[in-house]
Image (tube, rainbow, N blue to C red):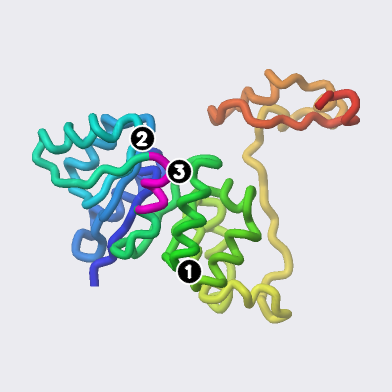
Amino acid sequence: MTQRIAVLGATGSIGDSTLAILAAQPHTYEVYALSGYHRLDKLFALCQQFLPKRVSVPTSAVDDFAHRLKAAGIDSEVVGGEAGLVDIATDSQTDTVVAAIVGAAGLPSTLAAARAGKRILLANKEALVMAGKVMIDAVKTHKATLLPLDSEHNAIFQCLPLAIQQDNTQIHQSNHGVRKLWLTASGGPFLQQSFEQMQQASVAEAVKHPNWSMGQKNICRFGDDDEQGA
């Protein structure tokens, strides 16, 4: 039976990879819904390719995007904002939710999908950082399925025994087969610096990653709190 997939955060890199797989298996997967925020031209092109039944955009863009789709002969329902994302994530026609919206913006729809008992492919690691216990409790209570989609998470998942992949509560048993996991960092601007040098690091140095452009996040400097300010 065809799986109906909602890709929330379709215009990012996770969306690109996911949609490439879905496009290669048209008899197995249907792109039921898509969402985008900043890259609406790219979202429009994806709508032309996949013809989703539902599309979510920022609230301010709903009317213009709906008109644009109609002019192109694309019969997709357009919804807006957080409420639109939640509505798609809990839609009875949605079988699987790809949670690829970056940051806190992805939490409400991901949590709603869990509470609706959906199969969730999670690329938004922030949802678990911010509300891990709430998310896991919702998954357990509503019998949802939570699978790691981001590369690092999925690599760890694939290392786990099949019993744990099928039922992650088994990881708490003594026979889980995993004694220790080592997570390595990608390097960063302070890879070759000593602890003493890192104590003197500035915010400008901290956000200048040699490989990735991540934007400025909350930075915690090494040292005493009273030296850093609030």
- Between discs 3 and 1, the one toward the N terminus: 3
Residue at which label 3 appears: 101
Dot 1 crowding, Cα within 10 Å, few <14, some 14–19, many 20+: some
Would you say 200 lies left or right of 190 here? right
SS type, badge 2: helix
- Between discs 1 and 2, the one toward the N terminus: 2
Could you say which quadrant of the image residue 221 lies in?
A: top right
- Amino acid at circle 1: Ala
Residue at which label 2 appears: 59
- Between discs 3 and 2, the one toward the N terminus: 2
Mark 3 or 2: the one toward you: 2
Dot 3 crowding, Cα within 10 Å, few <14, some 14–19, many 20+: many
Residue 36: give x, y in percent of width and height.
35, 38
Q: Quadrant of the N terminus?
A: bottom left
Q: Which is nearer the eye, 177 or 29? A: 29
Name the residue at 84% across, 26% down: 199
Q: Disc 1 to disc 2, how far (Cα)?
A: 28 Å
* CB-based contact (under 8 Å), mark 3 and mark 2: no
- Amino acid at circle 3: Ile
Q: Main secondary structure of the magenta part?
A: helix
Would you say 144 lies left or right of 28 here? right
Indicate whether 98 appears above or below 185: below
Specify start and end residues of the magenta stretch as a single range.
81-87
Residue 144 marker? 1
